[in-house]
């Protein structure tokens, strides 16, 4: 046999060769030291190459890509809430209780129907305008409150006079009375400052205002003062604390109301950049809501499909275990080549003339009748044309060891100081016919 | 169909990204290419998914590489790592240097050898490698033998160069 090429040796070590090929190669390797030495080198090369490739791996702590993996969605909130939140910035943000994205299972997002996307975009556009109006009105209301808390002394008497004359059916009407120009510019400054200030100081101003209310001349009932703190969040309030949104369109409510409405709108016009920023924020929030709800739907759909699949798999009967391989049936625990067999037996291994062995290996001595149980037997495995297994067990006879008396139907005999035993899945008659062909 | 795709995604996404990362040295690019591969699987569901997915991914790498060359952008096989677990700067540096050398050694291999090696590292059998790369099954052993030898030799040559320089 010529020397084995490198590709064959790699295929051998990769476990890609058939049983007969393996036997031939092993037989050659047993007799060719050159190929044996190359096999050893190749094994080292393979291990080294595997190690090198294994060292280039993805870092485990890196979060997965956002476009494929999405975070576990929170409970979807109604989209209507977004403008309200934008208009009432003093409400604390929800605590960040999400789990990190890389601990979430990956979810594949499948593109939507483009028509649906367009419809949704139009709807979002409408919601964006609604959010802008709500932001303008809400900010106007807050600025007026802040101003009232910060500079009540100069405008105090006028405010009180106006308040007593104003209709009592609107919260803003008590706050948004006509003021001197200086106060208006003061308010404008405060609006800008307020729009960029953090939430806590703003809350402080609001709190101060709320506390101050009862100390003023009792022109208005206490519940109205309470309502002022969260004007847009209480749309079901009594008529005397009507929400600010309705004021924007209540131009005909009376001269005082009309003036206040104009005032609110003026507040909205004062700094359009801020309003746009608020609106953009609200839109972004809407977008996030939309993505979360889509991810939730996709995840739920996948989960449901997984459960259905699992249920189907459980409903099916368990597949029958694969039939045992010839190697398992023959109970050979180690395959060997001809050289190793010759070393075990002190001479060439015996074979059945005219039959091609499937492979050769070592089996426990106890598995062969008459063999020394403390030593393994060399087992040559054959298959007949119907796939039935035939085993030729061989064990070197030690001095003093004798061929045992026949205890079974299978032939046991000695040849060249080797104990031989024929057994298998064929009948004893066939085994006895094969015995003379053992060489 | 969606369920099948989700199953494919769960089964092969990580392996595909790992293979692409070893091939490109750029995790973002690897993830982009893997997503593109799955997007194509949506439009044309494969019969034999694993060879199909990896063949498409490797084709995308080649196309992407050609585009990058025409734009005058160098492929970043040798780019050092910029991210990783916080194991300490020295360990990171050592590991990054080693990974960069392995990728440099991989760059020495010809395209087919490199791809066969990367597929074998993902557990492909010879017949799957043959199907993915359009090789005869009998040629896979020889291809892998050459690829492994060249990879190790190129890496060792770099190691020698490193110690000679220091």
Image (cartoon, coloured by chain):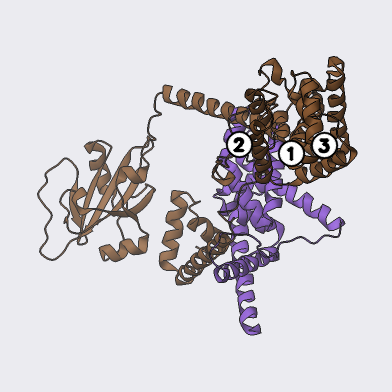
Chain colours: A brown, B purple
Judged by depth in the image, the label closer to the viewer, 3 or 2, is 3
Instruction: Tell me the chain of label 1.
Output: A
Judged by depth in the image, the label closer to the viewer, 1 or 3, is 1
Residue B76 placement, left or right of A319 = right
Q: Is residue A60 above or below residue A120?
A: below
Judged by depth in the image, the label closer to the viewer, 1 or 2, is 1
Q: Are marks 1 and 3 on the same chain?
A: yes
Q: Quadrant of the N terminus of chain B?
A: top right
Instruction: Tell me the chain of label 2.
Output: A
Q: What residue does disc 1 label?
A: A146
- Residue A109, can we see it? no
Q: The residue tagged with tag 1: helix, strand or loop?
A: helix
Find residue A56 and report its image quarter. Answer: bottom right
Task: Check residue A159 in the rendering and tell me which mark sits there, or answer none.
Answer: none
Whole-percent x, y for residue B159 in the image: 61, 76
Q: Residue at x 58, y 26 (%)?
A: A301
- First in sequence: mark 1 or mark 2? 2
Q: What residue does disc 3 label?
A: A275
| Disc 1 residue crowd, few under 14, some 14–19, many 20+, Cα 10 Å | many
CA–CA distance in space, label 1 to label 2 = 47 Å
Q: What residue does disc 2 label?
A: A107
- Residue A329, can we see it? yes
- First in sequence: mark 1 or mark 3? 1
């Amino acid at each position: 046999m010529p020397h084995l090429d490198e590709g064959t040796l790699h295929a051998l070590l990769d476990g890609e060769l058939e049983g007969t090929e393996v036997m031939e190669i092993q037989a050659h390797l047993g007799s060719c030291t050159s190929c044996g030495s190359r096999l050893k080198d190749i094994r080292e090369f393979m291990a080294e190459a595997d190690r090198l490739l294994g060292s280039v791996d993805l870092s485990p702590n890196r979060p997965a890509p956002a476009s494929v993996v999405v975070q576990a969605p929170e409970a979807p909130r109604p989209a209507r809430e977004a403008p309200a939140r934008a208009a009432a910035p003093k409400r604390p943000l929800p605590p960040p209780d999400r789990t990190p994205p890389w601990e979430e299972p990956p979810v594949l997002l499948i593109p939507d129907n483009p028509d649906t996307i367009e419809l949704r975009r139009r709807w979002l556009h409408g919601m964006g305008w609604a959010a802008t109006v709500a932001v303008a009105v809400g900010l106007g209301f807050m600025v007026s409150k802040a101003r009232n808390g910060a500079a009540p002394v100069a405008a105090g008497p006028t405010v009180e006079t106006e308040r007593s004359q104003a209709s009592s059916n609107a919260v803003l009407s008590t706050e948004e009375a006509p003021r001197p120009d200086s106060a208006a510019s003061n308010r404008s400054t405060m609006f800008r400052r307020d729009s960029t200030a953090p939430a806590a100081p703003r809350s402080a101003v609001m709190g101060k205002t709320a506390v101050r209310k009862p100390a003023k001349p009792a022109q208005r009932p206490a519940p109205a003062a309470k309502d002022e703190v969260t004007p847009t969040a209480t749309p079901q309030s009594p008529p005397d604390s009507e929400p600010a949104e309705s004021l924007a369109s209540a131009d005909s409510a009376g001269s005082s109301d009309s003036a206040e409405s104009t005032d609110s709108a003026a507040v909205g016009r004062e700094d359009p950049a801020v309003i746009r920023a608020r609106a953009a924020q609200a839109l972004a929030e809407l977008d996030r809501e939309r993505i979360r709800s889509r991810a939730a739907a996709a995840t739920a759909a996948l989960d449901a499909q997984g459960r259905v699949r699992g249920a189907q798999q459980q409903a099916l009967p368990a597949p029958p275990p694969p039939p045992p391989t010839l190697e398992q049936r023959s109970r050979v625990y180690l395959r060997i080549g001809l050289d190793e067999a010759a070393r075990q037996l002190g001479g060439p291994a015996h074979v059945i003339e005219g039959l091609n062995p499937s492979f050769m290996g070592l089996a426990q001595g106890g598995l062969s009748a008459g063999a020394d149980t403390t030593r393994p037997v060399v087992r040559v495995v054959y298959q007949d044309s119907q796939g039935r297994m035939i085993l030729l067990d061989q064990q070197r006879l030690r001095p003093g060891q004798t061929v045992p008396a026949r205890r079974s139907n299978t032939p046991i005999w000695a040849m060249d100081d080797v104990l031989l035993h024929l057994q298998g899945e064929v009948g004893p008659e066939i085994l006895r016919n094969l015995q003379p062909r053992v060489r | 169909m969606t369920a099948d795709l989700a199953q494919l995604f769960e089964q092969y996404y990580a392996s595909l990204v790992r293979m692409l990362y070893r091939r490109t040295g750029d995790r973002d690019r690897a993830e982009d290419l893997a997503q593109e591969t799955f997007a194509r699987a949506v439009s044309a569901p494969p019969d034999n998914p694993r060879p199909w997915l990896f063949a498409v991914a490797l084709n995308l790498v080649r196309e992407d590489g050609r585009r990058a060359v025409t734009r005058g952008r160098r492929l970043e096989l040798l780019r050092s790592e910029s991210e990783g677990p916080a194991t300490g700067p020295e360990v990171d540096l050592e590991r990054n240097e080693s990974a960069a050398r392995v990728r440099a050694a991989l760059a020495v291999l010809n395209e087919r050898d490199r791809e066969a090696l990367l597929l074998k590292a993902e557990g492909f059998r010879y017949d799957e490698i043959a199907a993915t790369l359009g090789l005869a099954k009998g040629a896979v052993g020889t291809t892998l033998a050459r690829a492994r030898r060249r990879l190790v030799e190129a890496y060792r040559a770099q190691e020698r160069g490193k110690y000679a320089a220091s």
